[in-house]
């Protein structure tokens, strides 16, 4: 399961789309659910104090990406403990 989490409410509080974002409590509820799953889970998002707390026991990989008008961001994939290390290779960039 890959869970692309909604952006943290505080990050875009000034934007109209923020009215559709999750509260910190909803993020905590989602994290509790994802932690309870027996299958493999990958969470996609950005570093934040909340996410770093909620997924502190999960391995993560960072990737630089362009977003928001081609500005550079660091995207993060958090891997649940059930994801075998060899699966991480799926997210490595091909070397040319």
Image (cartoon, rainbow, N blue to C red):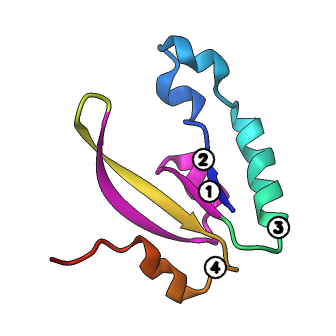
Q: CA distance from mark 2 to mark 3?
A: 20 Å
Q: CA distance from mark 4 to mark 1?
A: 19 Å
| Element on which disc 4 rests | loop
Q: Nearer the viewer, mark 4 or mark 1?
A: 4
Would you place residue 46 above or below residue 23 in this image?
Answer: below
| Left or right of 95 on screen, residue 23 | right
Q: Quadrant of the N terminus?
A: bottom right
- Residue at mark 2: 50
**Neighbour class for label 1 at 10 Å: few (<14), some, many (≥20)?**
few
- Residue at mark 1: 53
**Neighbour class for label 2 at 10 Å: few (<14), some, many (≥20)?**
few
Circles 2, 1 touching at the beta carbon (< 8 Å): yes
- Residue at mark 4: 83
**Neighbour class for label 4 at 10 Å: few (<14), some, many (≥20)?**
some
| Quarter where residue 72 is shown | top left
Residue under the point 23% across and 36% down: 71
| Quarter where residue 10 is shown | top right
Residue under the point 60% across and 66% down: 56
Q: Earlier in the sequence, mark 3 or mark 4?
A: 3
Residue under the point 61% across and 71% down: 58
Q: Over which residues does the magenta segment extend?
A: 42-67
- Residue at mark 3: 37
Q: CA distance from mark 1 to mark 3?
A: 18 Å
List x then y, in percent, for residue 50. Answer: 60, 47
Would you place residue 50 above or below residue 24 in this image?
Answer: below
Q: Earlier in the sequence, mark 1 or mark 3?
A: 3
Q: Earlier in the sequence, mark 4 or mark 2?
A: 2
List x then y, in percent, for residue 8. Answer: 57, 35
Would you place residue 6 above or below residue 54 in this image?
Answer: above
| Quarter where residue 68 is shown | top left
């Amino acid at each position: 399961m890959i869970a692309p989490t909604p952006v943290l409410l505080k990050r875009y509080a000034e934007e109209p789309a923020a009215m559709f974002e999750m509260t910190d409590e909803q993020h905590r509820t989602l994290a509790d659910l994802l932690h309870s799953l027996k299958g493999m889970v990958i969470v996609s998002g950005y570093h934040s104090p909340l996410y770093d707390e909620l997924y502190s026991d999960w391995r993560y990989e960072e990737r630089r990406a362009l977003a928001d008008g081609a500005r550079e961001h660091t995207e993060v994939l958090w891997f649940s403990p059930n994801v075998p290390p060899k699966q991480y290779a799926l997210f490595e960039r091909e070397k040319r």
